[in-house]
Image: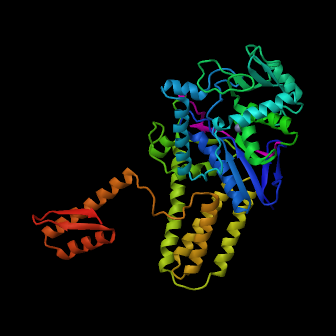
Amino acid sequence: MGLNLYNSLTRRKEEFEPLEKGRAGVYVCGPTVYGHAHLGHAKSYVSFDILVRYLRYLGYAVTYVQNITDVGHLTDDADEGEDKIAKEAKKEKTHPMALAEMYTRSFFEDMDRLNCVRPDISPRASGHIIEQIELVKTLVEKEYAYEVNGSVYFDVAKFAEYGKLSGRNVEEMQAGARVEVSPDKKSPVDFALWKKAEPNHIMQWPSPWGKGYPGWHLECSAMSMKYLGATIDIHGGGLENQFPHHECEIAQSEAANGVQFVRYWIHNNMVTVDSQKMGKSLNNFITLKQAFSGAHERLTRSYDPLAVRQLVLNSHYRSPLDFSDAALFAAQSGYEKITASVLAIRMRENSAPEGELDKKAAQSLEDFREKFEAGMNDDLNTSVALATMFEIVRFSTDLLDDKSTTKQTLDALDQLFRKLGGDVLGIVEDSYSGQEVTVEQQERFVRLVNSFMEERIKARREKKFELSDLIRDRLETSDIVVVDEADGTSTWRDK
Ligand SMILES: [Zn+2]
């Protein structure tokens, strides 16, 4: 069985077949960079990271494009309101581009810590104004768009398939539209491709229709086309963006190119925090930096970024995910369990007897791999994949208990952890040596060494020199150098 994905467009699971054999073009809607990434971003980007990692595991050459929205995303879906970034920049008294740059860096920093593979291309909307203007020109020429007072709107009535992704009906949308929509629009369901800029609007560019800026939906059509072609294999995004954002992307792209825009639409579900929708007013809005450091009143401790990642993998990407301190706590201990198992295997590999790969163990590893792949092939069921990882952990414990387990068997086990837990799930690391040590861990370490030092001083005072030498030697094996001063006191330092 190959990879089956739930296609939001056809509303069923379909076997993934790329346009070009062995290749996969993936476009995922990126963040609008006006704040630090939060738990919702973790759910979304870990989910698509898993998709990309698994496609690569299956041997596809993947081109992964994920944009950065740094202009044009307004506070109101009806093409009204302020630019989200400009609004925040005003508040923070900085230039919109400086704000976007700061939060773009912050986003990548957090995604790196979550072990999300960086996209191959991260195009910025502000860096693709020319491409966006060209696309609007094409749509005007083909009479899918019209200009009014320096703004250009997409004429939804001209695109019969509008609503096919979200299953919405245009007449119903028209009837339900709010009355205060722009009088420039022929229909309230029409959406802005290009907006006329007021003189005080900072982010604006010259265009055939005067000075203005692009509508939010436009960038994804223009940039996916530039880097992945008119038809792309997979388009991902959050369920909340299915309408209007993705519906508008389809209209723009298909009207301009006359071919299908996306073959497989993949949408991830949303997150709640303590069973409530995340929101600043509810005080349950948790950024990733707060989750990693524990600096939020809803959290009792700091969480390892990979434990946050593991919690995301616990549930299916199409299911909602509830973050809570208790859930994070459980994910943390689960993550530590897997890590401890991997470390134990790698340590024991050095001292285990040489010999052959145990046939029975090899068969079990093969069964685990099949089970893992069957789960992943079934619309990326990461909860099955993760459960299989825990089965491998239990299996490892038995092998580690058996002193006759060979180096070769342990190595096969380690390789399986690296492939499934590392390459695909991203929760097992190649090396744990270069890990950053938290302040908390450092303090615990210092307390521990100091307590050994006290024991040693006591031993010296009682003239138990054998014991004091033993403590010194043991500390030395941990790279701690003990220095005895002439006045009978002792100090220690890192080697
Ligand atoms: Zn998009």
Identify the residue shown where x is 87% and y is 42%: 259
Quarter of the image where the C terminus is located: bottom left
Q: How is the image coloured?
A: rainbow
Front residue of 230 and 419: 230
Identify the residue shown where x is 78% and y is 31%: 136
Ligand 1 falls in which quarter? top right
Judged left or right of residue 482, residue 398 is right
Front residue of 67 and 332: 67
Identify the residue shown where x is 63% and y is 81%: 358
Judge whether 63 appears above or below 89 on screen. Answer: below
**What is the x, y in percent for residue 10?**
85, 43
Question: Is residue 436 magenta-colored?
Answer: no
Q: Which residues are magenta?
A: 261-281
Judge whether 288 appears above or below 214 on screen. Answer: below
Question: Is residue 276 magenta-colored?
Answer: yes
**What is the x, y in percent for residue 292?**
48, 46
Identify the residue shown where x is 69% and y is 75%: 363
Residue 381 visible from this viewpoint: no
Q: Quadrant of residue 199?
A: top right
Residue 184 visible from this viewpoint: yes
Front residue of 352 and 184: 184
**What is the x, y in percent for residue 202?**
58, 24
Judged left or right of residue 475, residue 9 is right
Quarter of the image where the N terminus is located: bottom right
**What is the x, y in percent for residue 250?**
80, 37
Judged left or right of residue 65, residue 349 is left
The residue at the far left in this view is 487
